[in-house]
Image (cartoon, rainbow, N blue to C red):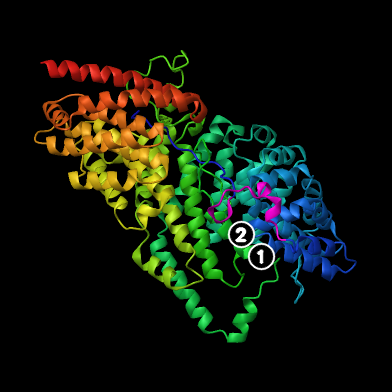
Amino acid sequence: MGKTKNNKFKRPSFSPDGLSATPVKQAEESEDEDSPAAELLDKLQSPSADVREYACASISRVVQQSQTIPGFLQRDAVRKIGPLLLDRSLAVRETAAGALRNLSACGGPEVCEDMVRQDALTPLSALLRECCSGFDVSSSPTVKGQKHTLEDVANEAVNLLWNLCESSSTAVSVFNKTGLLDVLLLCLQRHPQNMELAISAAHCLHTVTEENTELVCSVNAAVFGVLENILLSTHTSMEYTLLRTLATGSLWNLKSGLSSAQQSQTLTVLATTLSHNLSLDAGDLIPELWHAESARLSKETTSAAESDHTDERPAGHEMEEDVRDEKKNGRKPNGRMSNTKNDISDLLPRDRLELREAKALLSAQQTSLEIIVNMCCSDEPSDDEWEEMSSSDESEMCADGMSDTNSSLLSPLCLSAELHTILLNHNIPQQVLKKAEFPRAAALDLCSKDPTWKYLLKKMQRVQCRALTCLHNILSSMDTESLGGASGLQAVAQHLSSLVFSSAEALKDEEFLEAVTSALRSLLQIMATKNIPQCMTPNQLMSFCEAATSCELVSVRVNALAILGITGSSLAKEKNTADTLQLTGNALLNIAMKDSNLVVCGEALDALFDVFADGDEAEKAGKNINLLSSLKALQPGFRAKLRKEGKGKYSPDQLCVLDNIRINLKRFISYLENLSRK
């Protein structure tokens, strides 16, 4: 093993409350006989616009509880709500779009696919075109007291389109064929009048342009012109910063539609934008924004504050942020960075200007890091094919007799000289490392104490996780000197090691553990290759092993074992390390024999091969732990488990690697036997 593939990020699937997003499959008998679905759906046919609006708003609230969704789907809710997108009442249109929006967000990919199959995109497309055609007509100031505007309706519709395209490739295909790109561009250009709508459109555009060859072929100079005009805007608000960041992501996705000369110029513009975003210090800015809001709100009367907090938007959207944030963040099988829709600016009351700014800042930084991850990543197939490949005997025949032809997929991408230089010139590697630190205590403390700001804690932690994944890719794709040389790498290693043990909460956060262990693994590999001394103490090494190998996430356990193997291999070359090697060997043997996952067992064996491959200290430690007899004892069980479980439970590439380990285990036992005869 010992090799890792650069992480990418793709759109993850929705999963409310961290649960599997499969409400369609829930047992029908679990539905309450008194379900509100039937009554609310009947009210959609009422001749009264107020009743129709009430029904849509109620559905929007109710479907946030995912167990209620099957009841609506079984009663053909999508086909009943869809026509209301073109209702004669603007309020009904908005609340109908809001109900479908929440249904798509809380229902998951299966529900989104079902909505597309039931032709929700036809009335949605018509609604979007009608809204956009009326923008200029309705561009005059909003009439005082007016509750609903065309742009409010368009914002709900764009968010629904975003949800569907994020989860359904069919929706993206329909998007391409029906020319909805023009509609998004019109919404995007409304940023001087309506930033909420523009940001929603920018998020949607960032999503639909990802790996969309058909769309790239159809873009023209006008599309690039709209995006470039946004990038050249000089507004300093955080919402504009987020808008520019999303435009940057879309331009990166569409770059193949530019000429070589244009691509070079665009890369510099993109790097400048990303560097500026990462240079902003959320640790300073968030407390400043919090104090500014406190000062402003303290001057308002209680009645005015209560009035400002009343939002006439479709009921229930306040929960969609939590739905987005609780899903499995940032990764799909091939690991590409996602344009995840967990940053919806219109979910906050419009009077919370400072809070919206803080949220936009963190969203911009998260998205910036995601873009940099993909810049440093090749476009090869997915982590589904298993990101870990054996470090030895890669030319061995696989279990099915086919040679391993995929090893090249896992080689780190060497950045083009131009992109490498641009990233360095904009100080991006150092800025990424800075973002990998924990959020500053002052910002954490303020957000922890204020209920309305508390949800920013997760967003700050997500920025850190993205930075760690970004660091993993940068380490794999940049030369040592550009990262500070030997001393710089050692400092980074000490920092990453300390992060793992920074708090008890950190050890419970699987996303964080996966990100930090991936980055540390890459760094230690590079240091070992360059013969740079490791920095982890024996106690830290054992604590790390104990904490990380107990994690339920397989990738974290695999990273932990790889780190033990890399560190142990380096220690084996030093003097007086037999005791530490003995502890390491016992830990690896225990995992190789007892872990239920063959991938983890294989990584533990591979780490043992690395640690005890050579050296007097390794030979001494191996004898002390009876390594030879232990490996002989576990060999039959490993082979039997591989034969019994292999093909039904693991992918062909995983089986290829595991069979390679089986062969190496036999060879390593022979090596130890020869060593014992000397």
Confirm or deny contact between disc 2 and disc 1 (CB under 8 A): yes
Which residue lies at the image location 39% right of the left edge and 66% below the top edge?
443
Query: x%, y% of residue 268?
Result: 48, 41
Amino acid residing under circle 1: Gly
Q: Nearer the viewer, residue 310 or 177?
A: 310
Per the model, the C-alpha gap separating discs 2 and 1 is 8 Å
Query: x%, y% of residue 100?
Result: 73, 55
Question: Does the stretch in magenta take in 29?
Answer: yes
- Counting labels gives 2
Amino acid residing under circle 2: Glu
Q: How packed is label 1: few (under 14 Cα within 10 Å), some, or many (20 or more)? A: some
Location of mark 1 (residue): 316
Q: Nearer the viewer, residue 369 or 444?
A: 444
Which residue lies at the image location 82% right of the left edge and 65% below the top edge?
52
User: Element type at marker 2?
Assistant: helix
Quadrant in the picture for the C terminus: top left
Which residue lies at the image location 79% right of the left edge and 45% below the top edge?
118
Which residue lies at the image location 31% right of the left edge and 24% below the top edge?
635
Q: How packed is label 2: few (under 14 Cα within 10 Å), some, or many (20 or more)? A: many
User: Element type at marker 1?
Assistant: loop
Question: What segment carries the magenta color?
Answer: 15-32
Question: Does the stretch in magenta take in 27?
Answer: yes
Horizontal placement of 515 versus 324: left or right? left
Location of mark 2 (residue): 320
Query: x%, y% of residue 653?
Result: 47, 25
Quadrant in the picture for the N terminus: top left
